[in-house]
Image (tube, rainbow, N blue to C red):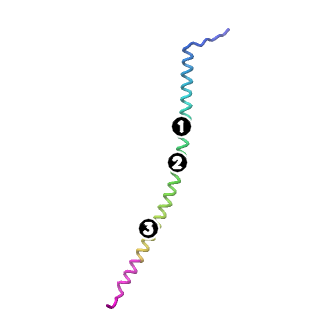
Amino acid sequence: MFEKKESSGDQVELVKFKELEGKIRVLIEEYSKVKKRNQELEGLLKKKDGELEEVNGLLKQLYEERDTVRAKVDSLLDMMQDIRVPG
């Protein structure tokens, strides 16, 4: 009674729609992969930032120790200048 005959134009549109749907699915999958990779990289960046802060703190401490040692050596050298060696 209600027979619907699909024309070849309808079939072509359906095929194109399915192709579009497939491409959209691929894009969504790729987006998910990129988003996941971005999160991984952000985590790695935070880790490296923490390591960098730690190294900078250690470097600052070493510079302070060096300056302290340098000041002590300078003080000792000044004290030695007052010593006269008989000659």
Determine the secondary structure under disc 1. Answer: helix
Residue highlighted by disc 1: 31
Residue highlighted by disc 2: 42
Question: Are the residues flagged by discs 1 and 3 in contact, CB closer than 8 Å?
Answer: no
- Residue 6 x %, y %: 59, 13
User: Residue placed farthest to the left in the image?
Assistant: 87
User: Residue placed farthest to the right in the image?
Assistant: 1
User: Residue placed farthest to the front in the image?
Assistant: 87
Q: Which residues are magenta?
A: 73-87
User: How many angstroms separate mark 3 from mark 2 (CA)?
Assistant: 31 Å
The crowd level at tag 3 (other Cα within 10 Å; few <14, some 14-19, many 20+) is few
Q: Earlier in the sequence, mark 1 or mark 3?
A: 1
Q: Is residue 76 magenta?
A: yes
Q: Earlier in the sequence, mark 3 or mark 2?
A: 2
Residue sitting nearer the eye, 39 or 87: 87
Residue highlighted by disc 3: 63
Determine the secondary structure under disc 3. Answer: helix
On residue 56, the disc is none
Determine the secondary structure under disc 2. Answer: helix
Q: Residue at x 55, y 34 (%)?
A: 28
